[in-house]
Amino acid sequence: MATLQHPSFQKLVPPLNFCPVEDQLYRSGQPTPINFPFIADLRLTAVIWLELEDPSEAFVNFTRVNRIRIYHLGIESGADVENDEVDPDAMQRSSGRHARSTNPWDQLPESSIVRALDIIAHKDNYPLLVCGGMGRHRTGTVIGCLRRVQKWNLASVSEEYRRFAGSRKRVLIELHIEAFDTNSVRVDPEVAPSFLLY
């Protein structure tokens, strides 16, 4: 008599504040090892990391094994952001690469927002995850500025930011998003994802 074999089920746990933003564009807090099977299923090409500190060693190792590029953009205004792709093998040496603020309450600098949106505006980076820390303020700033580029009205942009920030929302971030100069982002129709073509 044949025995019935049950399929093995893998628990898939998304990172904190995970949400699809657009087709193959996602946002979240920093993934932890319990989230790695879920993240692996996304088949990411790149991650935009928005925090001041380097991503965890476990996450960097996960991206190395899965051949995912990390762009570390949580740096101080005026720093060099041309060479922002993280070399996982040089992660320990990267801490002195940019002049960084030590205050986690500092807003994401305009140059980092523009660089993040330049990466988002290039379909070769997809599937793409925008993340950092808890996935609230810095991630919300970049996604809010993306929505401005997409010509969303400010009420909708603020509502989306507040949905992820919850009771920890910061009015200064909403004002930063509102004041963002959308003309600082160049969308090339030849390489842009379809959701940026309007």
Image (tube, helix red, strand yellow):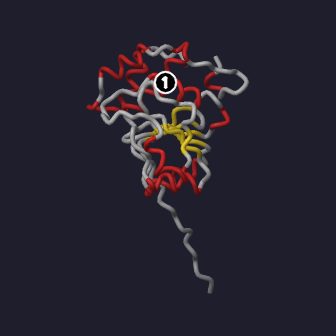
Left-right relation of 165 to 180: left
Q: Inspect this view and state whether residue 19 appears.
A: no
Q: Residue at x 36, y 27 (%)?
A: 107
How crowded is the residue under tag 1: few (<14 C-alpha within 10 Å), some, or many (20+)?
A: some
81 and 126: which is toward the camera? 81
For the view shown, which residue lies furthest in the left direction? 167
Kind of residue at badge 1? Ser
Q: At which x and y percent is residue 180?
A: 45, 16
Q: Is residue 88 above or below residue 8?
A: above
Quadrant in the picture for residue 52: top left
Q: Residue at x 46, y 51 (%)?
A: 92
Residue drawn at point x = 59 percent, y = 31 percent: 119
Could you say where residue 83 lies in the image, as x and y percent from the top left? 57, 35
- Mark 1 lies on a secondary structure that is helix
Q: Which residue is mark 1?
A: 111
* Image coordinates for residue 167, horizontal then vertical, percent: 26, 31
Q: Residue furthest right?
A: 190
Residue 72 or residue 117, whichever sits in front: 72
